[in-house]
Amino acid sequence: MDVDTALGGRWTSLCGGGREWLWRGPEPGRDTVSPGAAFVDAGGLEECVPTVRGTPDHGDAWSRPWRDTGPGEAVVECPRFTLTRRIAVRSGAVVADYRLAADPGYRFLWAAHALLDLSPAARLDAPAGTPTRLHPEAAASLPPGAWPSGRPWLTGDWPAPAGLALDALGPDDGTAVGAVLVGCSRVRVVDPPDALTFELECADQPRGLGLWRNLRGWPEGRPYRSVGVEPMLGAAFDLADAGPDDAATVPSTGEVAWRLTVSAHRPATAPDRPAPGVPPRHEEERWS
């Protein structure tokens, strides 16, 4: 895997099982951004903190240079917090350890904003029944009058909140939907024959999974396909919308620590199809 500490700490490559998982976007200008700039959809995995949507757009960290502080370790200093990240490969998985230091009581959201290069056959496996918050752009895909007036989200059960099936990640249908799976700390993206697993560990803080399923429905006038699967601390995209239990909060120690583990899998015999009703056996693939 590769990261670009000089340009926001972005993960620029994530190769596992003989394939590249990260998507690269069409937007120019990523190399000239400055703090507070509008987000540039360059692809890869962006570190979004202290918010995803809202102000500043996609947070403070992605638009600032990070400083290398050791093997696999980098730090970014923002106006109200300092974020340290250490990335290593352990037993075939990518393990990223984070530590955010700020004044006690500081509230924030964090998302590993991973945009993935997936085929139309891809799907997202998450626990059925997980409370899922649809965000306002989903209203266009719902029956007239289904969206509650003045509400930042509409909650239903995964995989089809409000009857809108979200687990299929293609083919392109001209829609764009954002959602947060509340309390979901482990998911698998299946893109046959491969799979990618995200697992987020953090004590005493709310966790979730952000989904941005853009199937050539955004931006208006020049839409393209981009699928974001985003492990996150919190349960909202915009910190301004987050209730008391929807954002991480720095405790009296002045630090919050968490770990993201990413592992790739490929069937041991990829060309062969399993017998009906029998899932394929998977093995972890080492990263490069």
Image: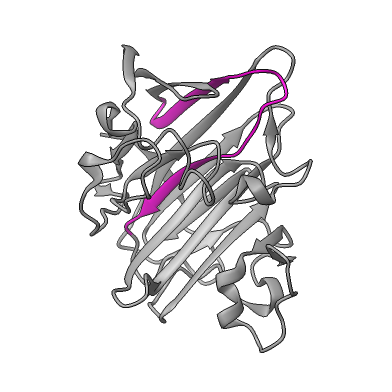
Q: Is residue 162 left or right of residue 192?
A: right
Q: Position of residue 279 (x, y in %)?
A: 52, 60
Q: Position of residue 159 (x, y in %)?
A: 64, 67
Please give the range of residues in magenta. 90-117
| Quadrant assignment, res 25 | bottom left
What residue occupies the far bottom of the structure in this picture? 144
| Quadrant assignment, res 144 | bottom right
The residue at 41%/61% (across/down) is 227
The residue at 58%/51% (across/down) is 237
In front: 90, or 221?
221
Quarter occupied by the C terminus: top left
Dominant secondary structure (helix, strand or loop) of the stretch shown in magenta: strand
- Above/below status of 87 relative to 156: above
- Above/below status of 139 relative to 70: below
In front: 248, or 189?
248
Residue 10 on the magenta span? no
Q: Is residue 97 left or right of residue 154?
A: left
Q: Is residue 226 left or right of residue 80?
A: left
Residue 115 on the magenta span? yes
Q: Position of residue 115 (x, y in %)?
A: 38, 52
What residue occupies the far right of the structure in this picture? 244
Residue 160 in view: yes
Q: Is residue 78 left or right of residue 157?
A: left
- Above/below status of 136 relative to 227: below
